[in-house]
Amino acid sequence: MKRISPWVMFALLFFCGYGVTATAVATTKSYETKKLAYQKVIESQDLEALNHFIEEYKDTGWEKSALWHRDKLIVNIAKKDGSVGALNDFLETYPNSAWYSHALHFRDKSAYRQAKMINEIEIYDDFLHLYPGSQWQEKVKKLKARLLSSKPVSYTHLTLPTIYSV
């Protein structure tokens, strides 16, 4: 017959004395296991590991916080990339993300900076059309107006009357 460790005996007596069942002890261990897995995956900053954790711990409550960290990681990667396309991908893929407004702000800011750098009327028109709710709408309109007022007027399409001398 196997002997029970004094620590196990203490734990059984302690928990039974306070009305804690074996199920509660198992749940506590399960909670600690989940917590440890959560902490490791958050520290890893690994997108694949976060997605795996979210799938594995679906409907446990832990996946919501992991989703927040995953979305933050994706937005930060997109911001480092600096491309409007990377931020658009995030916005289209995760429309319900807690990071949606943050990504939207940086997408519009990046698009504004690119339009300003190119400094062409067509690009400003594209911006105004593609980002109608952007906080940079007024700045783009002013840049477009300034560009329009600074362009020389072309008269190549006009024909001047011929003057005849008699």
Image (tube, grey):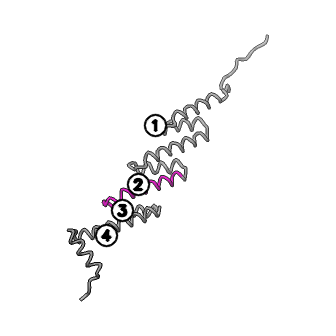
**What residue do we see at 43% from left, 61% from top?**
42
Mark 3, residue position = 55
Of the numbered discs 2 and 3, the one sitting upstream in the chain is 3
Residue placed furthest toward the right: 166
* Comes first in the chain, label 4 or label 1: 4
Residue lying at 73% horizontally and 17% vertically, measured from the top left: 162
Three-letter amino acid code of the residue under disc 4: Lys
Which mark sits nearer the N-terminus, 4 or 3? 4
**Residue at mark 4:** 29
Up-down relation of residue 39 to residue 104 (above or below)? below
The numbered disc on residue 9 is: none
- Indicate the secondary structure of the residue bearing disc 2: helix
Q: Are marks 4 and 3 in contact (CB under 8 Å)?
A: no
Tell me how far mark 4 sits from mark 1, CA to CA: 49 Å
Q: Nearer the viewer, residue 73 or 153?
A: 73
Check the image and report above or below for 80 versus 16: above
Amino acid type of the residue tagged 2 in the rendering:
Trp
Alpha carbons under labels 2 and 1: distance apart: 25 Å
At a point 60% along the width and 37% down the height, the residue shown is: 120
Residue lying at 52% horizontally and 38% vertically, measured from the top left? 127
Q: Counting other residues with Cα less than 10 Å from the Cα at mark 3, is it few (<14), some (14-19), or many (20 or more)?
A: few
Left or right side of 46 for 57: left
Q: Note whether 139 is above or below 3 in the view shown.
A: above
Q: CA distance from mark 2 to mark 3?
A: 14 Å
Please determine whether, in this image, residue 15 is positioned above or below residue 145.
below
Q: Nearer the viewer, mark 2 or mark 1?
A: 2
